[in-house]
Image: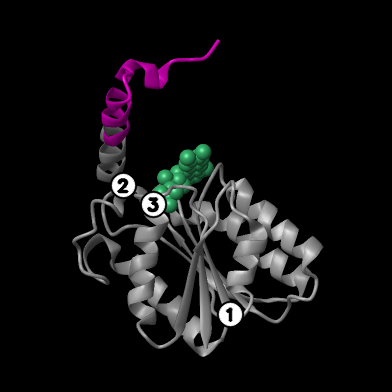
C-alpha cells in the first residue's frame, strides 16, 4: 500500500508541519510505502500530481492561515478538481497545525478538505487539528507520545491506523498538554526575539498602520 504525504507548509526549513509529520510517520513505521512531497507557492502542480497519483491514500499536512488552508493548497485542490476529474476513490486525510493554542481553530479548513472529497468522489478519511503548533520546535527532543504532545500524538496514532487500514475515522482537535498562558508567554517571547533579529523594535509589534 502506498501513502502520499503532502507537506503544504511554504517553509523550506523549520516547518512545524514537518515536525508534526515526524511524529505521524513514527506511527506509520514501515507498514506502508511512503511518498513524500512539498507543495508551495511556486510548485509545479503537474509534478506533485505525478508523484502522488499512484498512492492509495493522500495525507495533506498544512499550517492554518487566517483560519483556513494556505492559498496554494486551495488552488491545488481546485486545479485537481478542474483538470483531473478521473481522480476518485482515494482515501484523503488531513493534518493541520495552528499557531493558536486550540486545535479546534482548524475546523473550517478541515471542512474544506471534507467538502472537496465529497465533490470529487474521494473518500474523506478524517483529520487531526493540532493546536500550539509553534511549540513543536521546542519539543523536538520529547519522545513521541509523551509530555505536552501526548494527546496530539494519540490523535496522530489514531489517524495513522486509519491510513494503514484504509478506513475512516473522526476529526480530532487537540491541544498541548501544557498550560495555555505559558504557551502564550513563550510565543510572545519568540515574536519579540524574531523582530529584534530582523532589525525591528518590540514596540513595532503593536504599531497601527496608518
Ligand atoms: C500568514 C499567516 C497566517 C496565519 N494565520 C493563523 C490563524 O488564523 N490561526 C492560527 O492558529 N495560526 C495562524 N498562523 C500560524 C501558523 O498556522 C503556525 O505558525 C504554524 O505552526 C506554521 O506551520 P509551518 O511552520 O509548518 O508553516 C498563521 C501564520 C501565517 C504565516
Label 1 crowd (10 A; few <14 / some 14-19 / many >=20) = some
Label 3 crowd (10 A; few <14 / some 14-19 / many >=20) = many
Q: Position of residue 2 (x, y in %)?
A: 52, 83
Above or below 104: residue 35? below
Above or below 99: residue 55? below
Of pointers 1 and 2, the one earlier in the residue sequence: 1
Which of the 4 image quarters holds residue 156? bottom left
Answer yes or no: is residue 131 visible: no
Answer yes or no: is residue 31 visible: yes
Which of the 4 image quarters holds residue 39? bottom right
Q: Position of residue 163 (x, y in %)?
A: 50, 81
**How far apart, in angstroms, are the residues tagged by discs 2 and 3?**
22 Å
Instruction: Specify whether residue 108 is painted magenta.
Output: no
Which residue corresponds to the image point at 32% horizontal and 57% vertical from the top-left?
176
Of pointers 3 and 1, the one earlier in the residue sequence: 3
Q: Position of residue 95 (x, y in %)?
A: 49, 64
Which residue corresponds to the image point at 69% horizontal and 52% vertical from the top-left?
75
**Which region of the structure is painted magenta?**
190-210
Of pointers 2 and 3, the one earlier in the residue sequence: 3
Q: Secondary structure at mark 3?
A: loop
Q: Secondary structure at mark 1?
A: loop
The CB of the residue at mark 2 lies under 8 Å from ligand 1: no
Q: Is residue 139 left or right of residue 70?
A: left
Q: Position of residue 45 (x, y in %)?
A: 65, 58
Q: Is residue 209 left or right of residue 148?
A: right
Q: Nearer the viewer, mark 2 or mark 3?
A: 3
Q: Which residue is mark 3?
A: 15
The CB of the residue at mark 3 lies under 8 Å from ligand 1: yes
Quadrant location, the C terminus: top right
Amino acid at each position: 500500500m502506498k501513502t502520499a504525504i503532502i507537506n503544504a507548509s511554504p517553509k523550506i526549513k523549520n516547518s512545524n508541519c514537518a515536525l508534526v509529520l515526524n511524529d505521524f510517520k513514527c506511527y506509520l513505521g514501515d507498514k506502508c510505502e511512503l511518498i513524500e512531497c512539498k507543495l508551495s507557492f511556486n510548485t509545479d502542480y503537474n509534478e506533485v500530481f505525478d508523484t502522488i497519483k499512484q498512492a492509495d491514500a493522500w495525507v495533506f499536512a498544512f499550517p492554518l492561515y487566517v483560519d483556513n488552508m494556505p492559498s496554494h493548497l486551495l488552488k491545488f485542490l481546485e486545479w485537481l478538481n478542474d483538470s483531473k476529474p478521473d481522480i476518485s476513490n482515494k482515501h484523503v486525510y488531513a493534518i493541520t497545525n495552528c499557531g493558536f493554542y486550540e486545535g479546534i481553530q482548524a475546523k473550517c479548513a478541515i471542512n474544506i478538505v471534507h467538502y472537496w472529497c465529497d465533490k470529487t468522489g474521494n473518500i474523506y478519511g478524517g483529520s487531526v487539528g493540532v493546536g500550539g503548533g509553534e511549540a513543536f520546535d521546542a519539543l523536538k527532543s520529547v519522545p513521541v507520545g509523551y509530555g505536552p504532545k501526548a494527546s496530539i500524538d494519540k490523535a496522530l496514532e489514531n489517524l495513522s491506523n486509519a491510513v494503514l487500514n484504509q478506513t475512516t475515522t473522526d476529526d480530532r482537535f487537540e491541544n498541548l498538554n501544557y498550560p495555555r498562558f505559558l504557551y502564550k508567554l513563550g510565543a510572545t517571547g519568540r515574536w519579540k526575539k524574531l523582530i529584534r533579529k530582523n532589525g525591528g523594535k518590540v514596540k513595532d509589534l503593536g504599531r497601527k498602520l496608518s
